[in-house]
Amino acid sequence: MTRTTLIALATLGSAALLLGAYGFQHIGGLLPCKMCLWQRWPHAAAIAIGVVLMIGGPRPLIWAGALAAAATSLIGFYHAGVEWRWWPGPSSCTGGGLDLGAMGGSDLLSMDAPTGLVLCDEVVWSLMGLSMAGWNGVISLGLAAIWVLAARRT
């Protein structure tokens, strides 16, 4: 495959994952947690990098695409580990983030509480034992490899 084909493949892969995430959210009704949103930003960067490269951007920029794909892969694997309770996640979006004992009665009865709160340590969808975060980690690692192949093409 040519460098341009590999860049296009990696760019389209990130676009597919990003569109899939939006589809799960807006069509499937699965709201993203904070860490899910973190995983989207590197995909957006990889898409932008791919587009710039396709219109003649500088060749070293390919490594930035590889870095973006590797970053979202690492976030995905970290998030999957939080879901499996292998390590703690951010206290702001995991089950331990709310201290009910420190809340007063008016806080507990308040109707101003956030709705649609999604915790980062709960799996809302899985396929073959992997959550969306786990699949993002695996697929994005493959996309990072494609970016590296593109960078190494002469």
Image: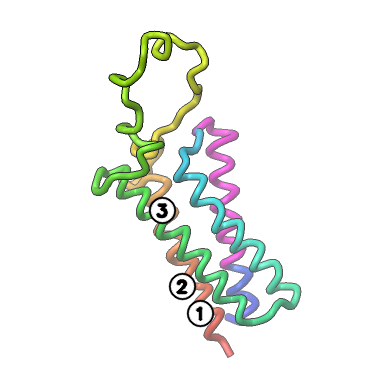
For badge 3, the amino acid type reads Gly
State which tag comes first along the sequence, 3 or 1: 3
Using the numbered discs, state the Cα–Cα distance from disc 2 to disc 3 in whole angstroms. 16 Å
Label 2 near label 1: C-beta < 8 Å?
yes
- Give x and y (percent) for residue 128: 33, 47
The residue lying at 35 percent from left, 18 percent from top is 103
| Residue reaching furthest to the right | 55
Q: CA distance from mark 1 to mark 2?
A: 6 Å
In the rendered image, residue 37, in percent from the top left (x then y), is placed at 52, 45
152 magenta-colored:
no
| Residue at screen point 50% across, 64% down | 69
The range drawn in magenta is: 10-30
Q: Secondary structure at mark 2?
A: helix
**Residue 50 sits above or below residue 56 on the image:** above
Give the image location of residue 108, x and y in percent.
39, 13
Determine the main secondary structure of the stretch shown in magenta. Answer: helix
Left-right relation of 88 to 115? left
Mark 2 residue type: Ala
Q: Which mark is residue 90?
A: none
Q: Nearer the viewer, residue 53 or 96?
A: 96
Task: Tell me which corner region of the image, top left, top right, bottom left or bottom right, holds residue 74.
Answer: bottom left
The residue that label 3 is drawn on is 76
Check residue 145 in the rendering and tell me which mark sits there, or answer none.
2
Residue displayed at 53% across by 30% down: 29
* Pointer 2 local density, CA inside 10 Å: few below 14, some 14–19, many at least 20: some
Q: Amino acid at mark 1?
A: Leu
Q: Nearer the viewer, mark 2 or mark 3?
A: 3
Residue 106 placement (x, y as % from top left) = 42, 9
Disc 1 target residue = 149
Label 3: how many residues lie within 10 Å, few (<14), some (14-19) or many (20+)?
many
Q: State yes or no: discs 3 and 1 in contact (Cβ < 8 Å).
A: no
